[in-house]
Image: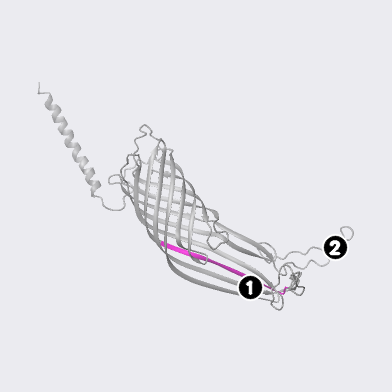
């Protein structure tokens, strides 16, 4: 009766002998790896990125491992500089954010590289002012008095000169910058994945480095008129002073343009945390970061002054014109601190692809150069829409 059990015992021992070395070899291979980067086929992907979603085990959520990629379109509103009279207002801009990284399943560690780019807002106010001799001489004669009675008694409207190639007229465009920026950022983070807690959340702390470049574009212009003695000529005569200069007394005009760019090159470290959990087809996540950086500020300012001697009137030709341009550079170092928050909801479409949307807040709390102010801030918030692959 015991003889039939011998072949069964031998079979069990044989299977065990073949299986155990394989498992040990796999575990040993994972433990022996210590480098920060991996090959693209390290996780043995099957490249079926658009395979149908397998929803037979919803509720047993297992975080993805391997390479992942995210792309987001950003729609933001950015606070105006403190030097503006309208400080407290926000203006619209847009940008993109790209994230590339990987997470290993053996030790639950990984790396993440993120880049963000904002190309605005670019908000200016413009005022078009007429120059002294903005109109040119009308054509002499003008075809006689034809065209129906009394034509010879009418004064034709002078043709406008094309002094300004933008407007096609003889005028100046006075631009005043309200909120004009360019922003880009790069960050590299080391991440760890902690075990799921009793509420179904998974936590991923991170530590990394961050580089940010912020450029503030500023511009202001003014236009003045003077008589032949150098007295300012107002646009409207003073009714209480009959001897004051009148607009027709203008004999010279002055155009002053001040513009520049304030560059902020920031580099430092950051700490962050991402936590998320899955509900049905939705993956709900939150991310928060705190950073501190050194800011190398450089400001380039340009002042252009143009003085033209020309009387008011039709067809007047300038007697002379003087142009003077001054360019200045300044630099400074400051300390910058700030934080960032991202809250997102991703809807699973296929096995590896999700569509997501979220809300973002980014704040550099102090030490940002804007205009001529070296201690301003950069605050922006908005929404994002994008896709993820294998995250």
Name the image quarter holding residue 315. bottom right
Give SS at disc 1. strand
Using the image as rendered, state which of residue 26 and residue 309 is in the foreground.
309
Q: Number of numbered discs present? A: 2
Mark 2 is surrounded, within 10 Å at the Cα level, by few (under 14), some (14 to 19) or many (20 or more) other residues, namely few
226, above or below 344, in the image: below
User: What's the residue at 46%, 70% (across, down)?
Assistant: 331
Position of residue 150 measured from the top left corner of the image (x, y, whole percent): 89, 61
Q: Nearer the viewer, residue 364 or 215?
A: 364
- Label 2 residue SS: loop
Q: Residue at x 60, y 69 (%)?
A: 257
What span is colored magenta in the figure? 250-266
* Image-based side of 367 in relation to 28, left or right: right
Q: Earlier in the sequence, mark 2 or mark 1?
A: 2
Q: Which residue is mark 2?
A: 154
Residue 255 drawn in magenta = yes
* Residue identified by numbered label 1: 306
Residue shown at 16%/33% (left/top)?
14
């Amino acid at each position: 009766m015991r003889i039939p059990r011998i072949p069964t015992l031998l079979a069990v021992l044989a299977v065990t002998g073949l299986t155990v070395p394989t498992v040990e070899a796999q575990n040993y291979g994972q433990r022996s790896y210590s480098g920060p980067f991996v090959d693209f086929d390290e996780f043995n992907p099957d490249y079926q990125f658009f395979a149908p979603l397998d929803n037979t085990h919803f509720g047993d959520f297992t975080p993805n491992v391997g390479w992942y990629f995210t792309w987001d379109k950003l729609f933001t509103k950015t606070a105006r500089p403190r030097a503006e009279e309208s400080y407290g207002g926000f203006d619209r801009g847009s940008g993109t954010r790209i994230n590339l990284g990987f997470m290993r399943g053996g030790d639950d560690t990984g790396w993440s590289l993120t880049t963000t780019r904002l190309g605005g807002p670019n908000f200016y106010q413009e005022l078009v002012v007429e120059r002294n001799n903005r109109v040119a001489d009308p054509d002499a004669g003008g075809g006689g008095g034809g065209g129906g009675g009394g034509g010879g008694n009418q004064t034709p409207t002078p043709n406008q000169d094309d002094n300004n190639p933008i407007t096609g007229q003889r005028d100046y465009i006075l631009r005043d910058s309200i909120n004009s920026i360019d922003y880009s950022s790069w960050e590299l983070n080391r991440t760890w994945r902690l075990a799921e807690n009793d509420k179904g959340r998974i936590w991923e702390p991170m530590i990394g480095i961050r580089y940010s470049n912020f450029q503030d574009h500023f511009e202001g212009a003014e236009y003045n008129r003077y008589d032949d003695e150098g007295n300012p000529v107002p646009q409207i005569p003073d009714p209480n002073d009959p001897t004051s200069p009148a607009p027709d007394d203008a004999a010279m005009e002055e155009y002053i343009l001040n513009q520049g760019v304030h560059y902020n090159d920031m580099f430092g470290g950051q700490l962050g945390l991402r936590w998320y959990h899955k509900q049905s087809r939705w993956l709900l996540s939150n991310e928060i970061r705190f950073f501190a950086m050194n800011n190398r500020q450089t400001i380039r300012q340009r002042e252009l002054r143009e003085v033209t001697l020309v009387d008011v009137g039709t067809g007047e030709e300038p007697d002379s014109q003087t142009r003077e341009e001054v360019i200045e550079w300044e630099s400074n170092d400051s300390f910058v601190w700030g934080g960032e928050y991202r809250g997102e909801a991703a809807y699973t479409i296929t096995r590896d692809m999700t569509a997501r949307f979220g809300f973002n807040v980014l704040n550099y709390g102090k030490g940002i150069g804007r205009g001529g102010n070296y201690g301003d801030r950069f605050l922006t918030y908005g929404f994002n829409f994008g896709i993820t692959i294998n995250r």
